[in-house]
Image (cartoon, helix red, strand yellow):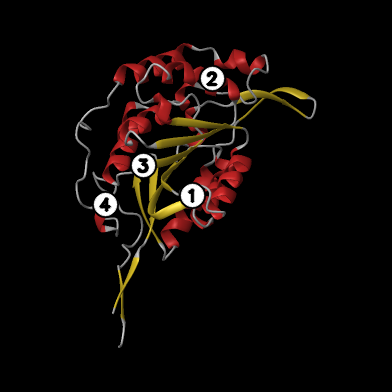
Amino acid sequence: MASTAVVTQRASGLASGAHPVTTFPNSHLAVPRSPAGYSKPFNVKAIDQLRQAVREENWERHYETRATSICMRSEWSASSDRCSQLQFVAAKMQARRVLEIGSFCGVGALALAEAVPEDGVVQVLELDGLVVRFGQKYQKRSPVGHKIKHMVGPAKDSLERLADGAGEGSMPAFDLVMIDADKEGMRHYFDTVCNSPGLLAEGGVVCVDLTPFKGQIPARYEKFGFPHRWQAESGIEAIEALKAYVEESAELVAHEIGSLLIVQRIQRQRTI
C-alpha cells in the first residue's frame, strides 16, 4: 500500500503574537488546556517575598568577598511578566517535567513549580551554591517548593550528566526547558537539549532568554594583573547567532515574545 507523507509547513521567519504557542505545529498546543485553578499562582506571596529579598541583598558585596564566583545583579530575577509567560507555556502544553538552565535565586523556578502538576518536577541547574541556598529558604515556604530539585555547578557539566541519564533510559524526558544562563554557552546548551536522545520529550518546547547583559551594567573585575577595569559581554552576538540559526532551520518553529525565544521542533506525521 502506498504511503503519503503529511508534513506540517513551517511558517517563514519567527512568528509573533499575543499567545506564544498559538501557531506551533503540534495540535495539542493549540487547544486551551489550562488546569483548574491556574488563573493565578497558588502562592504569590512566596514569590513576592523571594523577589523582594533578592532586590535587598548586596550582591556586589558577595562578589567582592568571593562568596559568589560571578558578579550577580538583582535584575536577574524573573519579572512578573516572565513568570506569567513561563506559567502560560507550561500550562498550555501540560508540562510535567521542566528543566531550568540558570536559575539565579529561583523566582522563575518557583513560578514554574506552581504551573506543573503535583507529581511534576522542576530541575534546576545553577552555578552558585549561595544563590541556591538563598532561594531555598523562600521556596520552602511555598506549598509547591518541594517540586524544585537542584544541581549545583557549571551548567555544561550538569547538563551532560542529565543527557547521559536520558540516553541510558534512567531519566524521563523534559517537556519544557528554560535556558537563562551565560550567553557564551547558550548555543551549546540549546544544541545539547535538542540533540541529546531522550532529553527533550517529543513535542517539547525550549525557551531561551534573549536579554543582553542580563540587565546589568558593566562590572569591575581583575584579570591578568590589571585591576579596576570595567567590562561586560553583552551576549548580543550569541543571541543573534542563535536566532538566525533557528530562523533558518527547516526543523524548528519559533516565536519571539519580548526577550523570550520559544522554540519547538516541527512534528511530522505519516499516514498510510
Q: Which residue is mark 1?
A: 240
- First in sequence, mark 1 or 4: give its number: 4
The numbered dot on residue 96 is 3
Q: Residue at x 30, y 33 (%)?
A: 84
Q: Quadrant of the C terminus?
A: bottom left
Would residue 5 appear left or right of 121 to someone viewing this image? left
Q: Are marks 2 and 1 in contact (CB under 8 Å)?
A: no
Q: Residue at x 51, y 17 (%)?
A: 134
Residue at which label 2 appears: 133
Three-letter amino acid code of the residue under disc 2: Arg
Element class at badge 3:
loop
Write down the residue under mark 4.
Answer: 29
- State the CA–CA distance, disc 1 to disc 4: 27 Å
Q: Earlier in the sequence, mark 2 or mark 4?
A: 4
Quarter where residue 68 is shown: top right
Tell which of 72 and 114 is nearer to you: 114
